[in-house]
Amino acid sequence: MMDPEELERIAARRAELDGLEEQLVKQLSEVRAERDELAVAERVWQRMSEQLADERTEAGSPVVQVAGRAVRRVPDRGRGWLSPHCRRSTSAS
């Protein structure tokens, strides 16, 4: 015949494992939901980055890669782009 104390310990351990299982199921569900949200955010970010790159290209200013990122290149400006007042100010320094 089985010892009643052993049966009680087995039942207690089973209850403990059942509670742990419930916690893990809930935690796994939360992790999956957050992972899905991050996947959506990543797709939105990628789409917006592509749209910005397209808009910059259409605007005429070239987009170049710097350290793996798309950046707008600032064109060189000739001498005549400053107003006469600004040219006097900069030449006086």
Image (cartoon, helix red, strand yellow):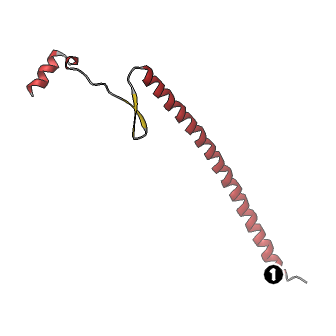
- Quadrant location of the N terminus? bottom right
The residue to which callout 1 is attached is 5
Q: Quadrant of the C terminus?
A: top left
Q: Is residue 9 above or below residue 26?
A: below
Measured along the vertical axis of the image, is residue 92 above or below residue 80? below
Task: Tell me the residue at 70%/63% (across/down).
Answer: 20
Amino acid type at mark 1: Glu
Q: Is residue 30 above or below residue 6?
A: above
Query: What residue occupies the far left of the structure in this picture?
Result: 92
Closer to us: 6 or 78 = 78
86 or 80, nearer to the observer: 80
Residue depicted at x 11% and y 24% = 91
Q: Position of residue 62 (x, y in %)?
A: 39, 25
At horizontal 20% and vertical 16% (from top left) the residue drawn is 80
Pinpoint residue 9: horizontal percent, then vertical percent: 78, 76
Q: Secondary structure at mark 1?
A: helix
Residue 59 point in image, percent of width and height: 41, 20
The residue sitting at the right extreme is: 1
- State which quadrant residue 83 falls in: top left
Q: Is residue 88 left or right of residue 50?
A: left
Report the number of numbered marks: 1
